[in-house]
Image (cartoon, rainbow, N blue to C red):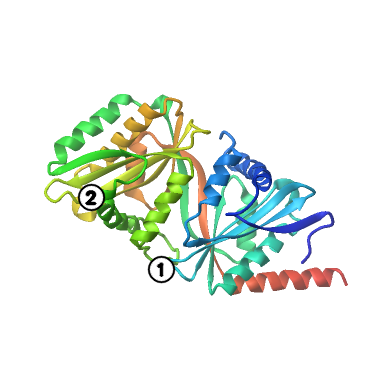
Amino acid sequence: MNLPAGLHLEPYDARTASDAFLGDLTAFTNAQLHERQPDDPPVVPAQLAASLRHLPAFVDLPAWVVRDGARIVAEANVALIRLDQNQHLAQVQLGVLAPYRRQHLGRVLLRHVTEAAHEDGRTLLMFSSNARVPAGEATLRHAGARPGLAAHVNQLDLASLDPQLLERWNAQGQERGSGYATEVWEGGVPEADFPSYLRVQQVTNDQPTGDLDVEDQHLSAEQLRAAEAHVQSSGRERVLAVVRRTTDRELVGFTELSWHPSRPSLLAQGFTGVSPDARGAGLGRWLKALALQRALRRNTEARFVRTENADVNVSMRRINEDLGFRPYSATTLWQLEVTQAQSYLERSRASALQANL
């Protein structure tokens, strides 16, 4: 299936793309962002460039854009993450600007994504859709994808936050958390704590995955260092709150908040987790309160905090709702077998040929 006249396909390398190209890609990214999250400040080219040019070495990212003249009107990339786990999986991002939909641009990009995944031995494609862009869900259903995990982006309006609530959670944590001590790190992980931080990262595998066909992920020390280097190179500011047992000083929980200096009004709440043997003492609330207090002292321009929670993650949703988070938008993770994508593309090609007879 070919592109309409006047449009052309262009592959790109995220790590080596020129400033001019990344400026064009940023304009496309902001158009997509405005459709999904219309209240957001725009991403600046330097932010996107820093994120793409410093991808960890264990991530390959074949990528393509469709241009109408100089303007990027569609883009797709497929993350091939080279870990010992989930070697069957390819994570796909694919978007088309609203005026260019229903012109087969998505199918052209899907063909390249599917070929790249197949050539790398991947058997499953994973996509994300946003309820504010219903065309995404409709297209995925038409291709035969199945929903794997429903979630919501939840938002905390800091104007409505009761500062005393954070103080209460802090006090309750100190009262109930006998035998534990908290710390707040700014920026990177202290070298002396890196082995313990690597171990506590395993708690991320406890989050619900619904019907997704995914395996637990276990980063090596080298891979976690690469991921941490990507955070540092991205230009984002970060607050990392941790809790440790006082007996052996082993880390048993953490949470992180981050923001980009070019978009200080938005704080991103990252993963919050506590080891199973330390749960039930209010450590999650304690960590969240400490991190948010520190972040608000460092970033006085913050107005909102955003996080994404699976709908089935009842325990984390309860904590966030008690803090004041409310639903902002609905998202879904979808799975599409590579063989299903190939069949869908072949059917589409045959239909197009038939239509032209």
59 relative position to 32: left or right? left
Cβ–Cβ under 8 Å for marks 2 and 1: no
Q: Secondary structure at mark 1?
A: loop
What residue lies at 62% left-to-right and 47% top-to-bottom? 133
On the image, the x and y values in percent for residue 119 come to: 59, 74
Q: Residue furthest right?
A: 357
86 relative position to 345: left or right? left
What residue lies at 22% left-to-right and 42% top-to-bottom? 282
Q: Please state which amino acid type lies under the numbered disc 1.
A: Gln
* Quadrant of res 108: bottom right
Of residue 135 and residue 23, the one placed in the foreground of this image is: 23
* Quadrant of res 187: top left
Of residue 123 and residue 67, the one placed in the foreground of this image is: 67
Of residue 303 and residue 147, the one placed in the foreground of this image is: 303
- Give the position of the C terminus as an image quadrant: bottom right
Q: Please state which amino acid type lies under the numbered disc 2.
A: Leu
102 relative position to 243: left or right? right
Query: What number is the disc on residue 85?
Result: 1
Nearer-N-terminus badge (2/1): 1
Mark 2 surroundings within 10 Å by alpha-carbon count, few (fewer than 14), some (14 through 19), many (20 or more): many
Q: Circle 2 sits on which residue?
A: 251
- Give the position of the N terminus as an image quadrant: bottom right
Q: Secondary structure at mark 2?
A: strand
What residue lies at 57% left-to-right and 69% top-to-bottom? 117
On the image, the x and y values in percent for residue 217 come to: 37, 63
On the image, the x and y values in percent for residue 152 come to: 47, 46
Mark 1 surroundings within 10 Å by alpha-carbon count, few (fewer than 14), some (14 through 19), many (20 or more): some
* Quadrant of res 26: top right
Residue 135, above or below 357: above
